[in-house]
Image (spheres, rainbow, N blue to C red):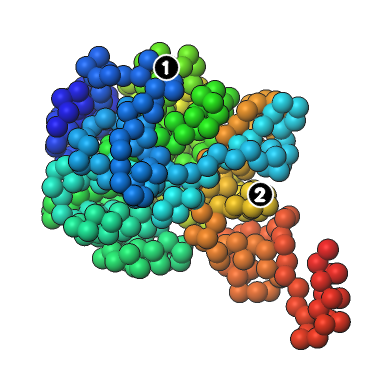
């Protein structure tokens, strides 16, 4: 075990530390979250940004493409032989002029989209799973488990199979998972339990089951997962010739990504590798606005490491009493009680970040605009583009800013939402979208019907112009 890494409570006033080889879901002393912390002074830490890739290990076959272990210098908690990879993180940062125009940028303003849908299981979760499974193997875990709105289960199932020695157990809320994602968990062989309840119920139960049965939990309370997700930021920087953008915009669900992004920049500043991080914008769905309510209405802050947890407790109580339940078509962010709340608050403070909400309608319109770039994303991912648009409208993001939107998952994850948006009025898919109160479809690309006859087909073709 490397002796320059340990697990550390994120609250300075607790500050408890634990060995890398231990397994915890929370700080055993105070109950808050744990970080993986490094003693940079005892490591060959990078002295300028291009050195982030200087310690990339030689991996075999598909693992050699890993866009996670490429930045080993910044996620050095495991010996070489423990590193787990499926070739995750071979993703792309693409200039997206169509998105930039939609978002309202002009002049020098640019949008680049970071397509995390190119991961082996089709979402950014694979970055984190490379970290979590590496740790799982270090501690000799036999079964990994998670609660999931879909992509975590797909990623867990894929990685467990790839180890050829671990089993996967998945808890999902009944009826709360996109078909594309459920199909992956089943196909890759995860034992799948549909719970009568929503994601938050599944999350609470999986933590209990994990304790009771000694299952290795890979939800984003697992600090080793967030280490893997930091690398999304390193890839963006590397793709930009190590130039820091003005803004990073990402969707917020359980807030693992935003927390990991914040940690990545906090460490780069700590090491003197960058002077100022980009500003972080975390976008909630209007129907799942917990972070936005706490930050924008209740003024909850990281507060230099002393967040007022009573504000969160009061919100949970209020949500219970008023039966406020998350509901959005963007199922990956349909979450009531984000487990990484405090880490996300830390990220917001470190990056002068903001939080906004967007409607399902704005999400689907933004998704169609992203799709026109020829790649596409799932609904939750498009929240970042819809959010960027709002922030430009508000004047928070300057029109000539350099903005990176993180697109978290592949378009094929939720084909019913896509077809529902584009297909003709009255179809069953359309009804699916309308079930969520989505009426307009500004960028709908409707198919037209035609008789089995060339003239009729040519006529129909003209009608699609
Ligand atoms: C998990 C997921 C999210 C939410 O990310 P958090 O890190 O939980 O905030 C967003 N989009 C997609 C596609 C996801 O799979
Ligand atoms: Zn603690």
- Residue 317 horizontal/vertical position (percent): 35, 43
Residue at point 84%, 69% (across, down):
463
Total marks in image: 2
Is 54 left or right of 90, judged from the image as shown? left
Q: Nearer the viewer, residue 126 or 178?
A: 126
Secondary structure category for the residue under label 2: loop
Q: Nearer the viewer, residue 307 or 406?
A: 406
Does residue 349 show up? no
Residue 149 higher or lower than 113, as above or below: below
Residue 373 circle label: 2
Which residue is tagged 1?
48
Residue at point 34%, 68% (across, down):
186
Q: Nearer the viewer, residue 425 or 36?
A: 36
Circle 2 or circle 1, nearest the eye: 1
Residue at point 17%, 33% (across, down):
20
> N-terminal of the two: label 2 or label 1?
1
């Amino acid at each position: 075990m490397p002796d320059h890494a340990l697990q550390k409570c994120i609250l300075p006033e607790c500050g408890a530390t634990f060995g890398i080889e231990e397994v915890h879901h929370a700080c055993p002393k105070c109950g808050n979250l744990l970080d993986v912390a490094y003693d940079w002074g005892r490591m060959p830490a990078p002295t300028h940004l291009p050195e982030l890739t200087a310690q990339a290990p030689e991996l075999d076959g598909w693992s050699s493409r890993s866009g996670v272990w490429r930045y080993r210098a910044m996620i050095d908690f495991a010996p070489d032989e423990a590193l787990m990879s499926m070739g995750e993180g071979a993703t792309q940062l693409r200039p997206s002029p169509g998105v930039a125009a939609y978002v309202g940028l002009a002049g020098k303003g640019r949008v680049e989209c970071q397509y995390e849908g190119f991961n082996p299981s089709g979402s950014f979760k694979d970055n984190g799973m490379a970290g979590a499974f590496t740790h799982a193997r270090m501690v000799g875990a036999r079964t990994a488990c998670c609660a999931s709105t879909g992509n975590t289960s797909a990623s867990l199932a894929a990685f467990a199979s790839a180890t050829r020695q671990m089993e996967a157990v998945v808890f999902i809320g009944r009826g709360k998972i996109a078909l594309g994602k459920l199909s992956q968990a089943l196909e890759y062989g995860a034992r799948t339990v549909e719970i009568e309840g929503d994601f938050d119920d599944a999350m609470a139960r999986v933590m209990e089951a994990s304790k009771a049965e000694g299952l290795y939990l890979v939800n984003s309370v697992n600090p080793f997962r967030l280490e893997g997700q930091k690398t999304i930021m390193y890839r963006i920087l590397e793709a930009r010739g190590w130039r820091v953008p003005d803004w990073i915009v990402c969707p917020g669900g359980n807030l693992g990504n935003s927390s990991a992004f914040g940690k990545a920049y906090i460490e780069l500043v700590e090491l003197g590798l960058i002077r100022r991080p980009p500003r972080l914008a975390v976008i909630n769905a209007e129907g799942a606005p917990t972070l936005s309510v706490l930050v924008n209405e209740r003024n909850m802050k990281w507060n230099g490491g002393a967040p007022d947890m009573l504000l969160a407790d009061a919100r949970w109580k209020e949500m219970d009493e008023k039966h406020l339940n998350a509901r959005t078509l963007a199922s990956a962010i349909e979450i009531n009680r984000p487990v990484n709340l405090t880490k996300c608050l830390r990220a917001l403070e470190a990056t002068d970040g903001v939080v906004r909400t967007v409607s399902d309608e704005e999400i689907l319109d933004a998704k169609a605009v992203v799709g026109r770039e020829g790649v596409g994303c799932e609904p939750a991912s498009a929240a970042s583009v819809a959010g960027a648009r709002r922030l430009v409208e508000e004047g928070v993001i300057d029109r000539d800013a350099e903005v990176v939107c993180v697109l978290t998952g592949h378009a094929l994850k939720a084909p019913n939402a896509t077809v529902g948006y584009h297909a003709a009025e009255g179809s069953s898919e359309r009804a699916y979208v309308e079930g969520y109160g989505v009426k307009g479809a500004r960028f709908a690309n409707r198919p037209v019907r035609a008789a089995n006859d060339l003239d009729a087909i040519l006529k129909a073709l003209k009608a699609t112009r």
